[in-house]
């Protein structure tokens, strides 16, 4: 009887997981099985391009920077920042425009509302989005980036960061 009940519970749990599909908010082309980047990573090389990414609490921004870019400063908000650089032989890498999409999910599988917008500042090009957190929370970010001057599969990364809100 105990073994039968245990098997039924296991089968029920497995069927619920299969029915759930991929987590909401995750870009379709980034499989959830894609490995997370190392905890201290902030960039990844993709041949001719480098993808830079970071996520920081918005209350670490100065009030002036937050105001200039329409970002709400709060211990309960996190800023995702993404840049694409094209490698240049014998010269500094060059920022390039393109399409960037991102999603954030906490460890409970709850999708966070995150939309990305482009910011240009002189030669620099950034893609930013902010997301709310609730207390201490670990977020898994999935990013897809496609430089405007590139063809083929987009650059894709997944990374995880822990935050401490109020």
Image (cartoon, rainbow, N blue to C red):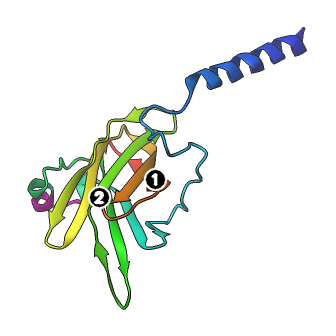
Q: Does residue 100 appear left or right of residue 118 in this picture? A: right
Q: Residue at x 56, y 44 (%)?
A: 31
Residue 149 location (% of width, % of height): 32, 65
Q: Which residues are magenta?
A: 61-65
Q: Report the number of discs.
A: 2
Name the residue tied to disc 1.
161
In the rendered image, which quarter contains the C terminus? top left
On residue 141, the disc is none
Name the residue located 35 percent from the left edge and 40 percent from the top edge. 133
- Residue 101 sits inside the magenta stretch: no
Spot the residue most to the front. 151
Quadrant into which the N terminus falls: top right
Q: In the rendered view, would you say 27 is above or below 4? A: below
- Identify the mark nearer the N-term, 1 or 2: 2
In percent of width and height, residue 19 lies at: 60, 21
Q: Residue furthest top?
A: 1
Q: Secondary structure at mark 2?
A: strand
Give the distance between the C-alpha atoms of the residues marked 1 and 2, in whole angstroms: 25 Å
Q: Is residue 18 above or below residue 101?
A: above
Answer yes or no: is residue 76 visible. no
């Amino acid at each position: 009887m105990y073994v039968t009940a245990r098997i039924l519970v296991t089968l029920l749990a497995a069927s619920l997981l299969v029915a759930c599909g991929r987590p909401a908010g995750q870009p379709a082309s980034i499989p959830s099985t894609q490995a997370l980047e190392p905890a201290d990573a902030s960039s990844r090389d993709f041949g001719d391009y480098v993808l830079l990414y970071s996520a920081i609490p918005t209350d670490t921004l100065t009030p002036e920077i937050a105001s200039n870019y329409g970002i709400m400063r709060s211990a309960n908000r996190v800023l995702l920042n993404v840049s694409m650089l094209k490698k240049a032989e014998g010269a500094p890498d060059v920022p390039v425009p393109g399409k960037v999409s991102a999603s954030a999910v906490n460890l409970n599988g709850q999708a966070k509302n995150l939309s990305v917008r482009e910011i240009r500042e002189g030669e620099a090009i950034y893609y930013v989005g902010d997301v709310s957190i609730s207390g201490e929370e670990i977020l898994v970010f999935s990013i897809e980036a496609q430089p405007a001057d590139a063809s083929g599969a987009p650059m894709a990364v997944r990374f995880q960061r822990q935050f401490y809100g109020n």
